[in-house]
Amino acid sequence: MPRDLSDADLIAVAERIRRAARSVRDGEVIPRLPEGGTERTRDLVDAVNELLAAAADREQERKLIVERNQDVLLALEELAREQAGELAAQNEALRRQNAELQAADRLKNEFLATVSHELRTPLNAVIGFSELLLEGLSGALAPEQAEYVADIHHAGRHLLGMINDILDLAKMDAGRLEFQPEQIDLCGPVREAEVMARPLAMKKSQSLEVFTDTPVPCYADPQRVRQIALNLMSNAVKFTPHGGHLKVTVRPVEDGAELEVTDDGIGIDPAHHHLIFEVFRQVDGSETREYQGTGLGLALVKRFAEAMGGTVRVESAVGKGASFFVRLLARAPQVRPLRLEPATGS
């Protein structure tokens, strides 16, 4: 067996290993131990060089990974900057567009309100004078003349109703339409609407049943409830053929009061139920549609009901008629009193 290494041999090899370790620590290129020395130290030097070579390979791999990660990080940072810039530009464009839309909507509402107001004055004069003629205050009219004046009066009332709807819509959009809810019997405003809707139904030989025998407490603005009921009844008359049947029911429900208006008219495709409450919309939106109108009636019904804390829903299918349900509060909302907790401490 070979004899043990001398102290001098061990010291020489240890010094080489120390210098190599210092190079590794300082991040320098990992060196190989110089070859040479005695035969007894050569095996030790070779073994150490193998370890150093393996360490050098791992260090090279680490540097490559770090470089790749840095490249990826730089690319991500650049992409983030680009996307942030694009997002900022898009946000600014959306902000400007939103401001322009709000301004346009405000101008539209002001225009509608102004035009509607200006139209109502001469239109009221037309309606008033036609009523005077029909009452014979300027002399008796021939039958044909009376028919023409009645047509003028009917068209004027119809146009005034549409103008009032447009004016109400403009006021609601501008936040200027006032609601004055109070404790009422829901049957009252519904009966008032019936008086105005029944002549429309009679012209189409339609039967109109109204069930308002039992008082139904309701917390709402009576004027707006009357508009809701009239709009629903008028809508039912419009979309129900001659000789059809309409039914209006007022009933108490849990924590509320409900108005139901049902007809056996043309009905509505369930896929279009969400459209009928949109402003200026009818399911048939063509210029030559059979049923004329502004498309505001149901939109105002929904807005009025929701403004008074209520809801609106419809049940209908094509050829099966339609039922509209308006649910309103039975009483004023309860305002919970603020309870102050007693102060704690010494």
Image (spheres, rainbow, N blue to C red):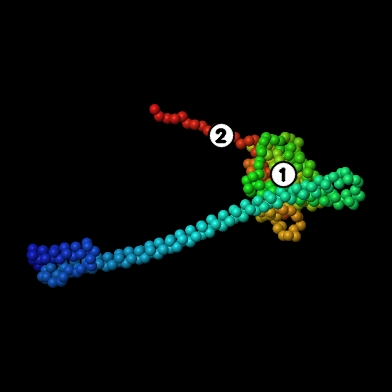
Q: Residue 34 is drawn in which quadrant? A: bottom left
Q: Please tell me which residue lies in front, 51 or 3.
A: 51
**Is 34 situated left or right of 323 in this image?**
left
For the N terminus, the image quarter is: bottom left
Total tally of numbered discs in the picture = 2
Percent x, y of residue 12:
11, 65
In the displayed structure, 128 sits above or below 271; it is: above
The residue lying furthest to the bottom in this view is 36
Q: Secondary structure at mark 1?
A: helix
Task: Specify whether 320 is left or right of 102.
Answer: right
Q: Of the numbered discs in the image, which one, if any, rests on residue 336?
A: 2
The percent coordinates of residue 108 (x first, y second) are 65, 53
Q: Position of residue 49 (x, y in %)?
A: 20, 68
Give above or below for 184 relative to 99. Answer: above
Of residues 330 and 199, the one nearer the viewer is 199
Residue displayed at 80% across by 49% down: 126
Q: Residues within 10 Å of mark 1 (few under 14, many from 20)?
A: many
Q: Quadrant of the C terminus?
A: top left
Residue at 72 percent of width and 60 percent of height: 286
